[in-house]
Amino acid sequence: MSDKSAIEWTDATWNPVTGCSKVSPGCAYCYAETLSLRFGWSRLPWTPDNAAENVVLHPERLDQPLKWRTPRMVFVNSMADLFHPLVPPEFIARVWMRMEAASDHTFQILTKRPERMQVVVDDLPYLPNVWLGTSIENDHWISRADTLRATRAAVRFISAEPLLGPLSSLNLAGIDWLIVGGESGGPPRRALVRKGVHTRGTRGNGQVPLAVEPRPEALQWVRELRDRAGTSGTAFFLKQWGGRTPKAGGRELDGRTWDEMPLLRLAATSSEPEFRHVGWSLDAIPRDDVRKIGGEREPRSRNGTTIEA
């Protein structure tokens, strides 16, 4: 948890939950798992079998955003998935309550489990300062966008990071923001970049070789997404090309960076769907949250695609 973040599209992170379990190919080289194991925040790999050990609630962190006086973008659970099946709806409701109280901040929630998000959010009040998003790494998981479209949110966004293939079937209708990024730290076969074969600029009498550069096919994937976003009125944000480290490949596409942010849609506009507001009662929310929870395990694969694929 930090009131400052190096993530390009947010200002701060807030982690009332930590830990997760892998659910699709984009999870295979998860940065949050790597950090958690390196620093001892988790003892076991983030497999479905270890989820009850790794998914941890932190009720003591719930009030942190209320202490930040300067309005900011807040990435909720950069080290977890708020809609993991082992996070009880009652605890999600407590997170929601804090976001409602901290209305000067804008909260960004990203999940690989949009089906559960849709169900849980339907029983929570609509908050104009909460953006909801889902991750889509390749065309196999494109249905997550359809579920997101059907979910009430002030802003709906998609994170195509790590981008592992073309998203030829991605429909951006009803999507306000598209973030694209390449994987860092994974094997070369999953990277959007390759060792540089071209040169740029001069050094003395010769050309400066590029350390890395986008693979031609990856360049085509990203350009197609950028152009589709422009056609649909979706803000486009290129976070990184990735590589051995997050910054190795830089952030430029066709000579510039792409840092577009979505326009806020207010709850009062006619474009928002009808919703019922659930009144809050502090007494109705249990205070005896346990730190480690058990429950139903997630499958090792979904629709025939293994996590490691």
Image (cartoon, rainbow, N blue to C red):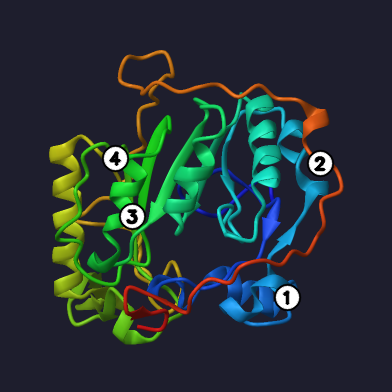
- Name the image quarter holding residue 279: top right
Describe the element under mark 3 as helix, strand or loop.
Answer: helix
Question: Circles 3 and 1: CB distance less than 8 Å?
Answer: no
The answer, for residue 3, to whether it is visible in the render is: no
Of circles 2 and 1, which is in front? 2
Q: Among all residues in the image, which is located at the extreme right?
A: 288
Residue ID at (59%, 73%): 33
Observer-nearest of 157 and 104: 157
Rendered location of residue 213, percent (x, y): 25, 73
Lateral position of residue 302 relative to residue 281, left or right: left
Distance between mark 4 and mark 3 Cα atoms: 12 Å
* Mark positioned earlier in the residue sequence (4 or 3): 3
Tag 3 residue: 144
The answer, for residue 169, to whether it is visible in the render is: yes
Tag 1 residue: 39
Distance between mark 4 and mark 2 Cα atoms: 35 Å
- The amino acid sitting under disc 2 is Pro
Q: Which mark is residue 286?
A: 2
